[in-house]
Amino acid sequence: MKLKALLLTLLLAATPVAAEPLRILAFGDSLTEGYGLPPKDGLVPQLQHWLTERGHDVVILNGGLSGDTATGGRVRIGYSLPRTKPDAVIVELGANDLLLGFAPATVEDSLDSILEQAGQGGKPLLLVGIASPRISPELQQEWAAIWPRLATQHDTLLLPNLYQPLFDQPPAELPELLQEDGLHASAKGVSLIVESLGPKVEDLIAKAEAGR
């Protein structure tokens, strides 16, 4: 009997334990949360489906909060991390700051704090920028410079503009890619965004898996 017990113990010890799915926190505002869309059509569910279809064993955690700014995010990230315990983090904030007319330098300072907190312990990060063609060229340049500068400072992956796939379409098609408010992406618009964002998240997954 003792021999059988010993053999069973050795067998169990030799059996590989399946790794838990990677946990990726998508930390952002209403664009991440899925404002105005049925649950299945939001950014996180569509991104989750896109990744699952490609065989990735990963869980995307929805850390979006409608109306949040980078200033609010630098406080919220502090309790979001211990609650969700992610292996990697996507940071998508700044759209509301842009709409509210906040100074780019102020937004950059807040995003710097968010990335510093989110990257503790060596967690890989993906920074997602936002821009608008409806502001002056000078201000566009000032905003556009924020994301690559922060990505370099924090050694993060980068998607410079979440909405670029929408702006790349013919102007006549843009209305159907946005909701009635003209700000938030429609389900079709989100699908286009995911096609652009997905490969960057795959790079994030590769970095997280390499760090396990």
Image (cartoon, rainbow, N blue to C red):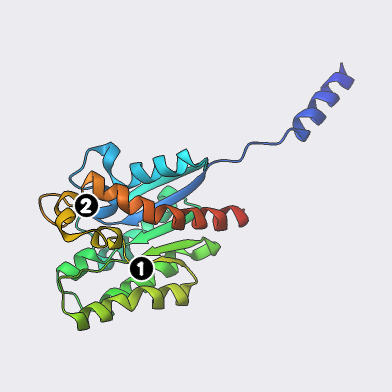
The N terminus - image quarter: top right
- The residue lying furthest to the right in this view is 3
Q: Secondary structure at mark 2?
A: loop
Query: x, y percentage for residue 93?
Result: 29, 63
Q: Which mark is residue 185?
A: 2
Residue 77 sits in quarter: bottom left
Are the residues flagged by discs 1 and 2 in contact, CB closer than 8 Å?
no
Q: Which mark is residue 39?
A: none
Q: Is residue 23 above or below residue 159?
A: above
Q: Is any atom of residue 146 visible in this view?
A: yes
Q: Viewer-proximal residue, 205 or 188? A: 188
- The residue lying furthest to the top in this view is 1
Q: Amino acid at mark 1?
A: Pro
Residue 7 sits in quarter: top right
Q: Amino acid at mark 2?
A: Ala
Label 2, residues with CA under 10 Å away: few <14, some 14-19, many ≥20? many
Query: x, y percentage for residue 148?
Result: 40, 75
Residue 146 sits in quarter: bottom left
Q: Is residue 137 above or below residue 22?
A: below
Query: x, y percentage for residue 209?
Result: 59, 52
Q: How far is the residue under mark 1 from the one under mark 2?
A: 17 Å
Q: Residue at x 48, y 64 (%)?
A: 119
For residue 111, side relative to residue 178 (left or right): right
Q: Viewer-proximal residue, 144 or 156? A: 144
Q: Which residue is mark 1?
A: 160
Q: Is any atom of residue 80 visible in this view?
A: no
Query: Which label's residue is closer to the chain start, 1 or 2?
Result: 1
Query: x, y percentage for residue 201?
Result: 45, 54
Label 1, residues with CA under 10 Å away: few <14, some 14-19, many ≥20? some
Q: Secondary structure at mark 1?
A: loop
